[in-house]
Amino acid sequence: MSSSAENPTLTTEITKPSTEIATETAQSAKKINLKTSDDQIFEVEESVAMEFATVKSFFEDAPSSTDTVPLPNVPAKPFSQVIEFCKEQIKFKANPDETEKKKSNSEFVKEKTNEDLVEMIPVANYLEIKDLLDVLNQAVADRIQNRSVEYVRSFFGIDNDFTSEEEALLREEHAWAFEDVDED
Amino acid sequence: MEERKWEDLEFDCLVNVLGRVDMESLLLYVPFVCKSWYEASLNPSCWKHLVFPQDMHSSWDVEDLTLIQKFNLWCPALISLSLSADHFLSSEYSCILPTLIGKWEHLESLWLANSDNLVDIITQISLACSNFSGLNVSSATIGEKEASAIVTNLPNIKSLILRGAEIDLENVVIILQGCRNLVHLDVRNCTGFISDDERVLELASNIKTFMCEGSRLDDYDYDYEDFGDDFDERFDGYRST
């Protein structure tokens, strides 16, 4: 494929793990090229790409299309992690084992940084990967639960857009739940 | 790479995350993060599961019933409600609950601190909550009136937890005969029937998870061991004071 010539470094990086696992099937499996918002091209096995509802419907609308599918809302870094997740998911599709799946999902999020999780959620949302979105949303919820406002803001890189008057008013509104809580 | 703007993230996505944090975080931290999070925290989808923690802030004046009424207005999408905390033992709660349940048409599970006014509560559930599937009552007293109400109003209930209840054999039988779709029945440490009663075991044989260990006819011959963890938890508070 011409894209491999254009992006030699990236293609080697992405296909390496999959060739190690399944050298024989790799030759026969159809590949699909996906282009991220930062202009990197990922060559992904069709079975993995079909996990992305957005990509799937792209091919359903234009079945004969062989071009590279643009993913304008998807940066490369979180996308490569999303691919990693979907590859694992496919294994469980062929061989369903809920306990192992849960274990694998929790290991997947455990080794991700806060930033990784936060970056992956919009990607999973855009690509409509429901299972991944569930796993990510739960992981983020677990990590922000019972943390301070400041922690949550820095977790997501959010700026406080309340004026001090607005904040005071809001705290007054919530006073019934808020008294006695130490500021941290 | 362009910086992710979480405050601008699709509202649905944010609400989905916030729907998974506990009640205290939703009240005490989330609304103050930024304006869009404040908006999101008011969305009914964030308030599907309401579990009042055992160690509620003393400032949450639960004696003042406006708290639960406030939640009633906030939570039209409520799926599960846990009022198991000791704060809800007051009979005022069991009196007000039937008037609130009509709003919670999606309610699937309810955990009560005691069985006061249980018949009224169950009747309202059967009228309003078509997907109701699980009831948990702490320190319940289940007489014929209550058992019949469960069978009549919740014949398709899937999970029933009456751990430590006072319930006679005939009322266990009424429930077992009337609620044929039970998947989970927990009548451990009850008083009023013995755990190896043949009739009970036979009727319960098709229930996937049936637990009745520690149940006995009367409670005067119990020993400390039988209470197990429950006993320890319940009395920890008293010991430390």
Image (cartoon, rainbow, N blue to C red):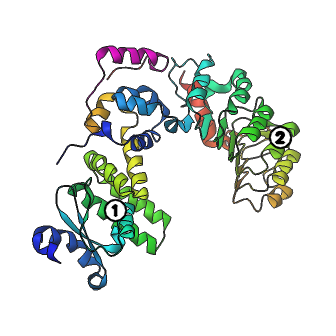
In terms of secondary structure, where does tag 2 sit? Answer: helix
The reply, left or right, for residue B203 in relation to residue B15 is right
Across and down, in percent, residue A29 comes to 31, 81
Classify the position of the C terminus of chain A by image quarter.
top left
* Contact (Cβ within 8 Å) of mark 1 with mark 2: no
Q: Nearer the viewer, residue A81 or B22?
A: A81
Name the chain letter of the residue that bears numbered label 1: A
Is residue A144 located in the magenta-colored stretch of the structure? no
According to the image, label 1 marks what residue? A85
Q: Nearer the viewer, residue B170 or A45?
A: A45
The reply, left or right, for residue B90 in relation to residue B31 is right
Is residue A171 located in the magenta-colored stretch of the structure? yes
Q: Nearer the viewer, residue B60 or B58?
A: B60
Distance, label 1 to label 2, CA atoms, is 49 Å
For the point 39% across and 65% down, which residue is it? Answer: A57
For the point 76% across and 62% down, which residue is it? Answer: B206
In terms of secondary structure, where does tag 1 sit? Answer: helix
Q: Is residue B211 visible?
A: yes
Magenta stretch, residue numbers: A159-180
Q: Amino acid at mark 1?
A: Phe
Total residue callouts: 2
Q: Is residue B123 above or below residue A90?
A: above
- What secondary structure predominates along the stretch shown in magenta? helix
Question: How would you rate the neighbour count of disc 2 (Cα within 10 Å): few for under 14, some for 14-19, many for 20 or more?
Answer: many
Q: Nearer the viewer, residue B159 or B36?
A: B36
Q: Amino acid at mark 2?
A: Ala
Question: How would you rate the neighbour count of disc 1 (Cα within 10 Å): few for under 14, some for 14-19, many for 20 or more?
Answer: some
According to the image, label 2 marks what residue? B149
Q: Is residue B138 above or below residue B239?
A: below
Place residue B28 in its image quadrant. top left
